[in-house]
Image (cartoon, coloured by chain):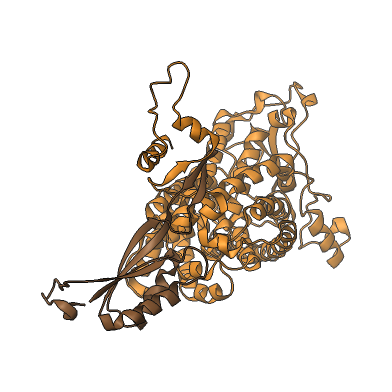
Amino acid sequence: MSLLMTMTHAVSMATASTGDCVKNAVYNQGVATPVAQTCSDANYIDTGDTAWQLTAATFVGLMSLPGLAVLYAGLVPKRWAVNTMFMAFTGFSTVLVVWVMWGYKMGFGTPIGSGGAHTWTNTYAGNGGGFVGFIKDFFENFVGHPQSINAGHAQMGQATLYANGGAFVPLQMPSSALAYFQFVFAGITPLLFLGSVLGRIKPLAWIIFVPAWCTFVYTVNAMLVWGGGYWAHEGVLDYSGGYVIHLAAGVSGFVAAWVIGPRLARDRAKWVPHSLTMVSVGAGIVWLGWNGFNGGDPYFASSDAAAAIINTNAAAAAALLTWVVLDMVLSRQKKPTFLGGINGMICGLVGITPCAGYVSGSSALWIGIIDCTVVWFAWSYLMPITMKYVDDASGVAYTHGLAGLTGGLLVGVFVDPSMVIYHSVGGSPITFKGVLYGHNAKQLLIQFLAALTIIIYDAIGTFIILKIVGLITGGLRLPDEVLELGDIGIHDEEAYPADEGFTRVDSMGAFAQAGLTGAGAGTTTATISSTSPTSTTETAGDLR
Amino acid sequence: MMLVTAVIKPFKLDAVKEALEAAGAKGLTVTEAQGFGRQKGHTEVYRGAEYQVAFTPKIKVEVLVDEAAVSGVLDAISKAARTEKIGDGKIWVTPVDTVVRIRTGETGPDAI
C-alpha cells in the first residue's frame, strides 16, 4: 500500500533492552502508543497482526499456485495445459529467489538517492529546484539499494516503515512476514502476464525473463508507488496494486506478446478452453485469495483490513453480475456465459484493488460496475482490433491493464475521508479525500501521472529485457513444429495421458517387468511375458 | 455408394472439412482416433520414468459419397491434409451396401 510509507532497515540487535521499547498492542483500539524507538526483540510482535499478515500472504500465494496455474490451464487447449502450469510454477519460483537475494530491498528498502520527501508542488528544495531538480529527485527515489534479506538478524528484526510528515507507524510484525507478503505480490505479477504470452515462448527465455523483469521493472514500480519512492511522496494512492501489479502486468504482457510474436495461426484461430471446470476452481481460489491481497495491505489486522475485504468481495460480485447482464443484453448471442462472468469477476477484483480500504461499501459496488463496464466495451470493440496486431492470448491488457488503470483513477474520485486507513502515533486518523468528497482534482492528476509513469517505464523495460533475453536464448519463440505438438513437444508430458499404449523403456522399466526381487517384494508384482503386446501394454499401464 | 475413410493429423481437420464441403460432400463423421503407421510413436517422461508411446493422436473422418464423387473427394482430402511430413495419414474407400436416412426413411443415394 502506498500511504507515503517506506520500509527502513530492520533495527540492529544493539538497541535491545533500552527500556524505551513499548509494545504497541493497543493499536487495534485505534490509538497507537508512541514508541521512542523501534524494538529489536520479540516485544514488538502483535500476534494478531503477525498471524494475519502470514495468513494473508499465504492466501495471495494460493492465488498463484494453484489459482492462476489451473485457471490458465483450463483456459488453454488441452495440448498447452502442462506448459501453462509449468510456466506458472517456474515463474513464481524465480521471483522468490530474486526477492530474498536483492529484490525486496530494491522495492522496499532505502532509495538509491537521498530518499527525501520533495514534492512536485514545491521547489524541489533538496535538489535545487526546477526541471533538473525534478529529474534528480525522481531518480533518487526510483529504486532501492539491492540487498539480501537472508541474514538471520534481518529475518528476526521488526518490520518498520515510516510515513511522510513524521507520522511514523510502528509495525508489529517481523520483517520476514512483510517480506513474504510483498513477495507473493511480486510473484503473481509475472504469472498474470503469462496469460499474454502463452503458446509460444521458450521455457528458458521465460525463466530468464521473469527474474530480470522482477529486478528491473517490478521493484521500480513498487518503490515508486509503495516503497517511499517518487510517486509515494507525491501521495499516489494504490491500496493493493492496481498499478504496481495489474497495470504493470497488462502493459508488460501486451509488449511481451508483441515482441515475442503471435501464436501459431491455427492457435489464434482456434483457442478453445479445454476445461471450464478447471477455470472454475482457479477463479474461485483467485477470488477468495483476494481477501489476503487487499485485506493484508493495511499491515494491521485492523478495521480497515476488514473493510477492504468486504469491499473487495462486493466489487467482485457486482462486476461479475454486470458482465453477465451486459452479455445478456448487448452481446450478439444475448446469452449469459460462465467465462464472461469470470472475466467480470476479475475486472471487479482488479478494479477494487487500488481502492479497497480507501472507499466505502457503496463506492465499492459502483467501482465494480464501472470497471467491468469499461472493460466489457473495450473487450468487445477494441480487442478485436488490437488482436490483429498484438496476440495478447488471454486479453491481460484488458482484464488487468485497463481494469487496473480504471480502478486507479477511480480512487481519486471515490476515496472517502471516513475510511480511517490507520492512526498515526498519538492517535490522529489518517484519511484521504476524493473528488466526490469535495477534494479538488489534484489527487486524480497524481493518479494519472503515476499511471503514465508505470505504462511508459514498464513498456520500455519489458521491451529491452526481452530483446536481451532473446539474444541469450537464440530467439524467444519455440519453432513452429514444436508449437504444433504443444506439451508433448516441449516437455515430453501431456496433461491427460491415455490409458493405453505406454511402454516403459528406461532401465527401471525392464526391472519392473522382470518382477520385483528382495524380501517381501517377490509376490507383489506379476511377472509378464514381454513378447505379448497386450499384456505388456496392460502392465505398463498398471505400473505407471 | 462409397464410404471414404481418412485418418489425418488433428490440426488438419478444419482444412479437410472445408475442402470436403467445397467438393460437394453433404456431411461427415469425425472420431478421435489413435494409431501408428510409418510415423512411430513418441517418448514421454513422467517423474523420470521414460515411456515409448505407441500411438499418436489422429482424427478419423468418414464421408459417404456417390461413386462419381469419389475421386474429387479423395483429391480434396489429400490436398487439404498434406503437410509432406511423416504422419499425414491415409485414405481408403469401401463400398457401401445400404444407407438409410433415419428421419425420412429414404434409402440409397437419396439418403446421402
- Can residue A162 be seen? no
* Residue A161 position in % (x across, y down): 70, 41
Q: Looking at the image, is A218 positioned above or below residue B73?
A: above
Residue extending farthest left: B105
Q: Is residue A452 left or right of residue A286?
A: right
Quadrant for the C terminus of chain A in the image: top left
Query: How many numbered marks appear?
Result: 0
* Residue A472 position in % (x across, y down): 74, 56
Say which residue appears at 40% left-offset and 48% top-offset: A498
Q: Is residue A63 left or right of residue A425?
A: left
Q: Colour of chain A?
A: orange
- Can residue A20 be seen? yes
Front position in the image: A352 or A467: A467
Say which residue appears at 79% left-offset and 61% top-offset: A122
Front position in the image: A22 or A409: A409
Rendered image quadrant of residue A433: bottom right
* Residue A100 position in % (x across, y down): 70, 39
Q: Looking at the image, is A93 positioned above or below residue B40?
A: above
Residue extending farthest right: A128
Say which residue appears at 40% left-offset and 29% top-offset: A527
Front position in the image: A335 or A170: A335
Say which residue appears at 58% left-offset and 32% top-offset: A50
* Residue A322 position in % (x across, y down): 39, 64
Residue extending farthest front: A531
Q: Colour of chain B?
A: brown
Q: Looking at the image, is A197 positioned above or below residue B49?
A: below
Residue extending farthest top: A519
Rendered image quadrant of residue A129: bottom right
Q: Is residue A47 left or right of residue A103?
A: left
